[in-house]
Amino acid sequence: MNYIGSKYSLLQFLDECISEVTKGSEENKVFCDLFSGTANVGKYFKKKGFQIIANDLQYYSYVLCKQYIDNHKPLLFNNIKEELSITEDENIKDKVCSYLDTIDGVEGFVYNNFCKGKHTENEEYRLYFSDENGAKCDAIRQKIEHWHKERKITNNEYYFLLATLIENIDKVANTASVYGAFLKKIKSSAQKTLTMKPAEMIYNDKEHFVYNEDANKLIRKIKTDILYLDPPYNQRQYSANYHVLETIAKYDNPLLKGKTGMRDYSQQKSDYCNKRKVKEVFNDLIMNANAKYIFLSYNNEGLMSFEEIKQIMSKRGKYGCFSKQYNRFKADKESETRHIKTNITTEYLHYVICE
Ligand SMILES: C[S@@+](CC[C@H](N)C(=O)[O-])C[C@H]1O[C@@H](n2cnc3c(N)ncnc32)[C@H](O)[C@@H]1O
């Protein structure tokens, strides 16, 4: 997923730095990704054998984490096999996704609020998805919910299917990059049909823990060896920029406001996006962390200065920092295409070895 602040292209850098700092110490088993977003960082360290604690304030992110982090055993879909006339267990999750690809579209919440749908050309409407994809998304979302309510699928199967829907609907969104605005005409990638390409499964023998809480509340309840922090760097609230994914994930018929169809996000505003509050919440987080090592990703354009971070983290022990020049991609909103501008920033990985 194309996500603001995604660390997908920095995973190697993170791994090298974290390995260098933690080498030689007794084995570290628990890795906490407290601001998970796409779950990419947790996924990477899960594959390396860590037990993962994942968390994010956004529900769509929780769904992704439930799938990529929490799910670690094969899914069986035993209770819908008959309904779907599936006789063999091989690739069963792919078969369930293929089945969902064939069901008829429904004129539901997404179709009515995020597509042209029944609106005439003269009426105002939101064009986040083609009509076909909006109706297909509604049909699949309702089917998943129905199966879950009827106890035909387990929680693990539910989150696998929801994460699959979130990942694939995002691929056909008619936006320049985020959901703060939609494009006036359906661009070519949004004309493609929504397809339920199964979400990746990462199998292993460890139990993992996934939360949907404010980081500063959760930090008081958990213990980890490695704490990785990747909070927002600037004022852009994730709840505003990914509100459509939040609504599809929750599917709770929210009251939508304005041109972009924003849901109420007053309870999901992050203090890490607030210039006045960020230092205080960051200090509170660091002081309450029960970890052997704390790592923080931040860049040179963030709300907190390098010196402010260093001063706060140094209170917990031996402080250090790595840096990397990073080619950040920015969507050019003016051109209404995924026209890309590059912007070179310095990405820092601050760390403290806690005493
Ligand atoms: C920079 S992104 C993380 C990106 C992630 N590392 C990745 O690679 O996809 C920051 C994340 O922090 C979450 N967030 C912001 N404030 C939070 C808070 N107070 N508690 C928990 N999560 C928060 C946002 O929803 C967002 O997903």
Image: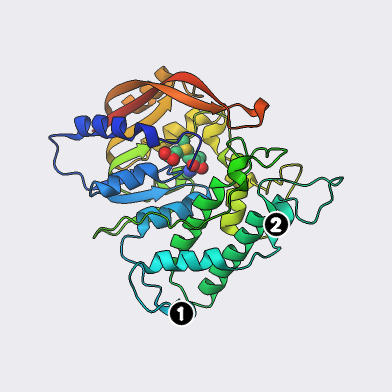
Of residues 305 and 255, the one nearer the viewer is 255
Residue 111: mark in rendering: 2
Q: Amino acid at mark 2?
A: Tyr
- Left or right of residue 28, residue 302 in this image: right
- Count of numbered labels shown in the rendering: 2
In contact (CB < 8 Å): disc 1 and disc 2: no
Q: Label 1, on which residue?
A: 85
Q: Residues within 10 Å of mark 2 (few under 14, many from 20)?
A: many
On the image, the x and y values in percent for residue 295 come to 33, 33
Q: Is mark 1 within 8 Å of ligand 1?
A: no
On the image, the x and y values in percent for residue 198 come to 43, 58
Looking at the rendered structure, the secondary structure element under dot 1 is: loop
Instruction: Specify the quadrant of the image occupied by residue 230.
Output: top left
Q: Residue furthest right?
A: 122
- Left or right of residue 272, residue 25 in this image: left
Q: Which residue does the image show at 31% across and 50% down from the upper left? A: 52
Q: Which residue does the image show at 35% across and 66% down from the upper left? A: 91
- Left or right of residue 129, residue 88 in this image: left
Q: Amino acid at mark 1?
A: Ser
Looking at the rendered structure, the secondary structure element under dot 2 is: helix
How far apart are the two marked residues, 1 and 2, measured between alpha carbons?
29 Å
- Left or right of residue 323, residue 26 in this image: left
Q: Which residue does the image show at 30% across and 22% down from the upper left? A: 322
Give the colour scheme shown.
Answer: rainbow
